[in-house]
Image: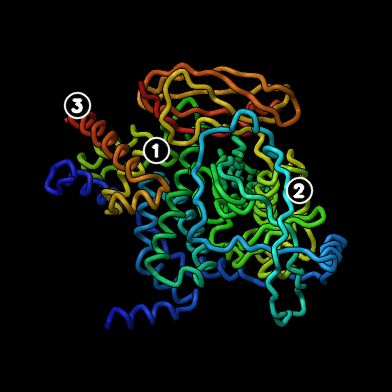
Amino acid sequence: MVYEECVTHESSWNADEALTAVYTAHYTSLVRLAALLLRDTGTAEEIVQDAFVAMHGRWHRLRDPHKALAYLRTAVVNRTRSRQRHLVVVDKHMPRSLPDEPSAEQAALRTAETDRVIEAMRTLPEKQRTVMVLRYYGDLSEAEIADTMGISRGSVKSHAARASKSLRQVLEQNL
Amino acid sequence: MNNDDPFDELMRRSLADEANRVEPTDALPEILNRAHAVRRPVVRRPWVVTAGLAAVGTAAAVGAFTVFNGNLNTANEGDAVAGAPGTTASASGAPDTPRSEPTKAPTQPPTNAKPSTTAVPKTGLREPSADAKTVPVYWLGDAIAGKDAAKASTKPTLSARSTIRLYRTWSKISGRPAFEAVRIMTTQQPNDYDYRSFWKGAQVSSVTQNDGIVTVDFKEFPQTKADEVTAALSAQQLIYTVQGALGAGNHPVQVTYRGRSGVPLFGQIDTSGPLNRAQAADVQALVSIESPTEGMLVTSPITVQGLATAFETTVNYRATNLKSRQVVASTVNTDEGQKSSGFSFPLDLKPGLWQIEAYLVSAEDGSISDLDSKTVEVVR
């Protein structure tokens, strides 16, 4: 009953109310998700803001904060993925270089362990990296990852398996 | 996956740790401002009944037929297929002669017209059904001007967006080809993640042909408010898809909303008259890989096929092994220069994940001007 009331309430939100509610609950985590994929906070913020603007425009179709979140996640993952692909192409000499190296100060705040994992993640192909970020940071199920990335659950499984295998190898070497 | 696995724990902890370093600044006011700017009502032009529309009206008097490709639940979903079917790989697909199958028109009580829209008489012939046919479906994608992408401008500008192009994929359908193609275009996710569509949410109700005009009627229009360039290209996406599926003649396309013309599409495209196909050189991707498709499992040797409009016919290609970073690169010539024509090259690749890229290099500064890429897994 409480749930029903809640849903009724949410579906009566106008686009501004919905945007404000979803923004408050998820803006930071979406920017962080995009930043993990891109390693560039400025671009991550820009991509997430674009996604919110788009969500606002289609709120009368979404009408549900859960759908809105799924929509935002897909939009953000889409855009970061195409941005990553561009970077790979543009910089052919350093195909895995990333736009924003952390400053020394920021780097010092990271633990050595995090450093190793993040470094290892950089060696993964873009799709595998995306699957891993959605799984371990986004805490999404296989089905949710498949929906978000527009690929089959089987592909999610195989990307995850390959990514885990290479990460384990790299991390063991570095230990 | 076992949650107690130390590897899982390490991944969760490290990614959370890394993520927590990012503290975005508050952007709510800016987002709301931008959202409202996008939704500002567009200036409406006075409505004119065009010659094309008049033609539809005349034909109605002669007595014609309507058909609704009604039930969405039973319609074929359409499977994406790899690459172009050999003999029909022309921009417009195989010719497909429409048969006249007169059907009684259901009499519809006239609805109250809004002042700015015009009821289009529900007339026209539906296309014949096909048991199994491969139809082209177009999507939007970024052509990637290398130098522009490198600048990574913070706000999308008109010039950055104007590098959006139409990319074609192929889908197998059974049913009415143009109707099914539009349905795939409006409901499905393109099979390459670099492609996208602003038609999500639209619901097509019929595709009919009458006197050299194709009418596509929608039960729901897309709700997206696109910018001017994207809206115009999205309209071309529909026109190319419909014309490609119908195959015969590039007839103008009249878009109607629940039988009425003049309801602006994407908030700005004037649909009071039929829309014409834009020049391929202006809207189609200058280079695209049609086979293999994204994520496909393939055995070596692979034949990569695509279309390009290349200066002096040269298309560059490169396959990169995503693990070893081994690169195989070369160039291939298209059949004809300066116009859209096919290219094809063989690749002999070891098993593994490969990214295949076909691209054009700018004659001006040697940068990559247009590109399409597919990631495939080569298996034994």
**Mark 1: amino acid:** Glu
**Mark 3: amino acid:** Gln
Q: Are marks 1 and 2 in contact (CB under 8 Å)?
A: no
Residue B287, compared with residue B229, is above or below; it is above
Q: Residue at x 76, y 69 (%)?
A: B120
Q: Judge left or right: residue A131 versus residue B292.
A: left
Q: Do badges 3 and 1 share one subunit?
A: yes
According to the image, label 3 marks what residue?
A173
Residue B184, compared with residue B262, is above or below; it is above
Q: Residue at x 51, y 52 (%)?
A: B76
Q: Secondary structure at mark 3?
A: helix
Q: Secondary structure at mark 1?
A: helix
Q: Do badges 1 and 2 share one subunit?
A: no
According to the image, label 2 marks what residue?
B277
Q: Residue at x 66, y 45 (%)?
A: B245
Q: Judge left or right: residue B174 versus residue B337.
A: left
Please provide percent x and percent y for residue A22.
Answer: 40, 69
CA separation in Å, label 3 and label 2: 58 Å
According to the image, label 1 marks what residue?
A126
CA separation in Å, label 3 and label 1: 22 Å
**Mark 2: amino acid:** Arg
Please provide percent x and percent y for residue B188.
Answer: 50, 52
